[in-house]
Amino acid sequence: MSDHLSTFVADFNRTVESVENLLSIARAGELQREAVVTLEATQSSVGGAKAAAAAAGEEDYANLLLGCECVAAALMAELRMWLLLKEEKPDEAWNELVNAQMSSMDAVRAHKVFAHLEQHVQKLEAIEKIVFPPQVFVSSGMIVGHQECSICESDYDDCDHLIGIPYMGRFCYIIARDISLDHVAIVKEPADKHCRVERFNVDGVVRNRMTWRIERSGDVG
């Protein structure tokens, strides 16, 4: 890694260290909002460096920067979660918690230098269980006509790329084509924790599962 790139990574690490001090509901909201703005600028800068590394064929460095992007996204999501909780918006805060969890796990997959973030994932899972009430998750079963690779855009069964693996700063994922819904089920371990029951009907009223407030009378829309 060149001196310039080493300096770039060192600057990123300093930004992360300063932001990590603000990952608490007790920290001042104005400082957390300022940190989000800083991270947005940092993420944009990392994205430009990643594109340059990919164009130069420097795959290891491009994947390292992909991990940096994921770390920035995870930190922004966690900061927003605390801010939203202070604003009494737990439904929105839940979504940011899930974003933080997913981005942290993406960073671990992006490059080996982020293996230590598995501990942060565990911390976020603890926050999920301690701060938020238990959730009811749903999952959709779908029939897929065919699957394309996001990297080479060919049929996934015919290419050499693997789902979840980074290639030149990009994760491989499947693009589903010709899909139709088969069923929806309640599950304990969903693929996406964004998919949950937010409201339910009981005794003729609609109750918010997160806040437990009664929001309106009548059937759930």
Image (cartoon, helix red, strand yellow):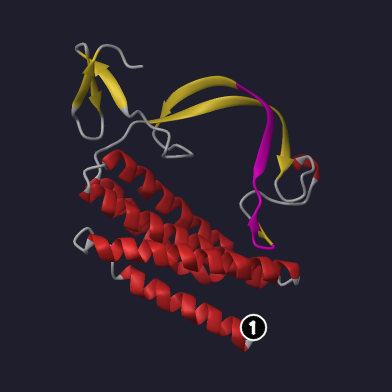
**115 versus 203 height, above or below:** below
Instruction: Specify the quadrant that holds the N terminus.
Output: bottom right
Residue at mark 1: 1
- Would you say the magenta stretch is mainly helix, strand or loop? strand
Q: Is residue 25 left or right of residue 4?
A: left
**130 versus 5 height, above or below:** above
Of 104 and 4, nearer the camera is 4
Task: Check the image and name the residue furthest to the bottom.
Answer: 3
Q: Is residue 141 left or right of residue 217?
A: right
| Residue 156 occupies quadrant | top right
**64 versus 124 height, above or below:** below
Residue 132 lies, in percent from the top left, at 25, 43
At x 65% / y 62%, what residue is drawn?
Answer: 169
Residue 111 visible in rendering: no
At x 71% / y 72%, what residue is drawn?
Answer: 58
Residue 219 lies, in percent from the top left, at 30, 12
Residue 220 visible in rendering: yes
At x 81% / y 43%, what residue is drawn?
Answer: 158
Q: Hey, what amino acid is under mark 1? A: Met
Magenta-drawn stretch contains 28: no
At x 25% / y 35%, what residue is drawn?
Answer: 210
| Image mark count | 1
| Residue 137 occupies quadrant | top left
Residue 133 lies, in percent from the top left, at 24, 39
Magenta segment boundaries in residue numbering: 168-180
Give the SS element for disc 1: loop
Q: Is residue 67 left or right of residue 206?
A: right
Residue 84 lies, in percent from the top left, at 28, 48
Q: Is residue 61 left or right of residue 137?
A: right
